[in-house]
Image: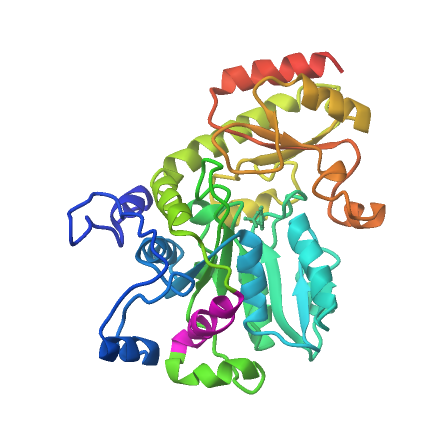
Amino acid sequence: MRFNTKLLHQNYGPDEKTGASLTPIYQSTSFSHSAEEMENIFKGSEYGFTYTRINNPTIEAFERRIASLENGIGAVACSSGMAAITLAILNILKTGDEILSSSGIFGGTYELFKDFENFGITVKFAKDNSIDAFKESITNNTKLIYIETIGNPKLDVPDIKSLSVLAHENKIPLIVDNTVTTPYLIRPIEMGADIVIHSTSKFINGHGNSIGGIIVDSGKFNWDFNKYSMLKKFEKYGQFAYLAKLRKGLFRNIGACMSPFNAYLNNLGLETLGIRMERLCQNAYELAVFLKEFDKVLSVNYPGLKESPFHDIAKRQFGDKFGAILTIRVGSKEKAYKMINSLKYATNITNIGDTRTLIIHPSSTILAESSDEEKKFMGVFDDLIRICVGLEDIEDLKEDFKQAIDRL
Ligand SMILES: *Cc1c(COP(=O)(O)O)cnc(C)c1O
């Protein structure tokens, strides 16, 4: 089955009881069973739904579809992308452990990693994306490597295959945030990643109507239960140990589940992921090439452009598609503001992966809490604008950007 057919048919069928063509919204907190059944479900010898904080048919339909698209053995849907990142990491780490992260990561994740420091989990950032930079930062306490497929908003592209080899040589898992690329561009598990996470609020939902996140496990990582001692209790689940620990442990106990209604909207949005991504990538490429022609645009950063230092690795990993996000520099904060306020079709919003073109000034918003040095490290400058291209007709976008640039 190919990608678009998979989106519509894999792990999908009419509702068994009613024939409803879409998975219904089971907006119910709990599910009733006989006393014996209930015991068996809690014991794990029988499968069933009990309480929506643990599992739910609408949410499970979404989890199964994402797990199969990412070639994982299972998935856990969460209340947000941040919840997914938090749970994916805390499921296996404890005080004294270290995370090794790429530097160009999403601002929210960067802030979360600072929060982890309060719990005694240290985060080290590789100074660039070279394997050597990661290698020199690994210590005996490093318990995972964390990267994004395309750093947001730095738009750098780490080499997933090489980093997975490095991680596995050190007997630690590689966790990859695939939000920006989605399984349409890349399935990190095929390249050696162990755990994939998404903010489903973005391209997967696709219409800006539901905050959500998801964790997918490849089931391939060979956990050392002495090193990852909190998984020991779940050893009996074999390759499902990580997912069992999540579902029966931290995920259940912290209570960051997705709502059934949001899962319904995500299931619906997911069906058009392929055609949306195809159009978004095409629009982003055309806009990037168009913006390069203006003297007032000092630089255009997009992995799809040949001059991007990450073009070759992006091409190797993603093929001929490079995502919907580009950044430009226009010379000053004032000019950036003027441009943002002059655009008709690009909405100034702190989000990506919507149907409409979205634009933001990251330095004064997403990274407002960060120091100048931190911003520079994350590739953010005062005159930088992030553009997440939408599904509009490209000629309209070009006209709109042209009139806004002419006013600078
Ligand atoms: C938005 C985003 C997140 C956080 O997701 P939320 O759903 O907003 O909590 C994490 N990673 C990346 C790359 C993102 O773009």
* Rendered location of residue 283, percent (x, y): 50, 27
* Rendered location of residue 101, percent (x, y): 67, 61
Q: How is the image coloured?
A: rainbow
Instruction: Answer above or below: position of 193 versus 289.
Output: below
* Quarter of the figure with the C terminus: top right
Instruction: Answer above or below: position of 47 versus 16.
Output: below
* Quarter holding residue 300: top right
Q: Residue at x 68, y 44 (%)?
A: 154
Q: Residue at x 71, y 78 (%)?
A: 96
Q: Seen in the image, is 136 located left or right of residue 232?
A: right
The verdict on residue 317 being magenta is no
Stretch in magenta? 239-254
Along the line of sight, the residue nearer the viewer: 371 or 101? 371
* Rendered location of residue 139, percent (x, y): 71, 76
* Rendered location of residue 356, percent (x, y): 51, 28
Q: Is residue 236 visible?
A: yes
Q: Is residue 193 visible?
A: no
* Quarter holding residue 72: bottom left
